[in-house]
Amino acid sequence: MADDESVTTLEDLRTDLAQRYKWTSSSGSSVDPAIVDADWAALDREGYVIWESLLSAEECREINDVVRPWLGHTGRNSFEGKRTQRIYSVLSRTRVCDRLVDHPRVLAVLDRLLMPNYLLSALQAINIQPGESAQLAHHDDGFYPIPRPRAPLAAATIWAIDDFTADNGATVLYPGSHRWGKRRPGPNDPLLPVVMPAGSCVFFVGTLWHGGGANTTARDRLAVTAQYCQPWLRPMEAFTLSISREIAREVSDDIRRMLGYSIHPPFVGAVDGLHPLRLLDEPT
Ligand SMILES: O=C(O)CCC(=O)C(=O)O
């Protein structure tokens, strides 16, 4: 590619080699740039931003009604949480969480943070039960073996489906820790429980230290987390294997692109040398 004088930057390469599928903007472009600027400033300063009440009570109830019957076994280790129930591959089961995955407010920030055609890395429901202890602090792009300090390789949203309170397992963040180098959180580092009403969302960069909180109440804490990564990284969940082509046709353009029906130019993600969207043109 380096010898091709017509190709100078990644911007030139936002389409496939056959020029058949052009780059299209995400629904994030519908958000007022001044709002995105403010979100961006908060992310740069603190590593996170909280958006209150993006979902209605009715939307939270619908998600709760669909997800709750699937909750079964608890985690297989203390990281998953011995008193925490997780549903993986939510996109293969229901459409009720789609509007969280491709929410314009989320995509507007991702459009600035990550490279074009960033991917969905995980979509999980997480139910922290009474008696669960605090999860080990971690940062979500920590499993990519690239030393810190560095720019985030990923980002996460956690959507409160139940109210998040200081004692029911609300996600706990270490503000500003996205800038840390090698060190881990210590006992003197200030912690912030993300207290927010149901329907709210906390967005944080993949370098921010955080964890699920302890639940000392008698009630569950249900959340949905969508995580995203650079388009040149391997996502946590192999969505191209777990999501059928029927579902890939059904979801929004933004979700389809984030599932892997997209290219990181010039050819990362290609199928038999072609753009993966061609698979959806074929009968299944
Ligand atoms: O459920 C939460 O609040 C956070 C969970 C988390 O960070 C994780 O499992 O990676």
Image (spheres, grey):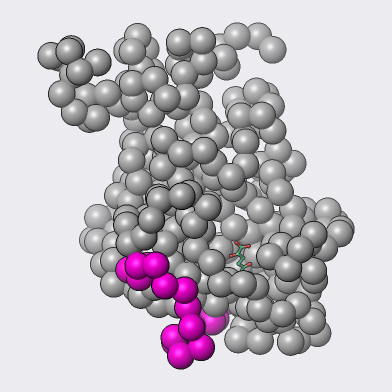
Q: Quadrant of residue 208?
A: bottom left
Q: Quadrant of the C terminus?
A: top right
Q: Nearer the viewer, residue 99 or 202?
A: 202
Residue extent of the magenta highlight: 178-198
Q: What residue appears at the point 42 percent right and 72 percent down from the top-left corner?
A: 183
Q: Residue at x 36, y 60 (%)?
A: 148
- 40 horizontally vs 56: left or right: left
Q: Is residue 71 left or right of residue 101?
A: right
Residue drawn 46% across the image and 50% down it? 145
Task: Say left or right for 132 vs 60.
Answer: right
Ligand 1's quadrant is bottom right
Expressed as whole percent of the image width and height from the top left, the position of residue 117 reads: 40, 35
Dividing the image into 4 quarters, which one contains the N terminus?
Answer: top left
Residue 49 is drawn in which quadrant?
A: bottom left
- Badge count: 0
Q: Residue furthest bottom?
A: 188
Viewer-side residue, 86 vs 164 = 86
Res 104 seen here: no
Is 18 or 62 nearer to us in this picture? 18
Residue 62 quadrant: bottom right
Residue in view at x 45 percent, y 10 percent: 273
Seen in the picture, residue 85 relative to 163 is either above or below; the reply is above
Q: Is residue 172 visible?
A: yes
Rendered position, 99 above or below 271: below
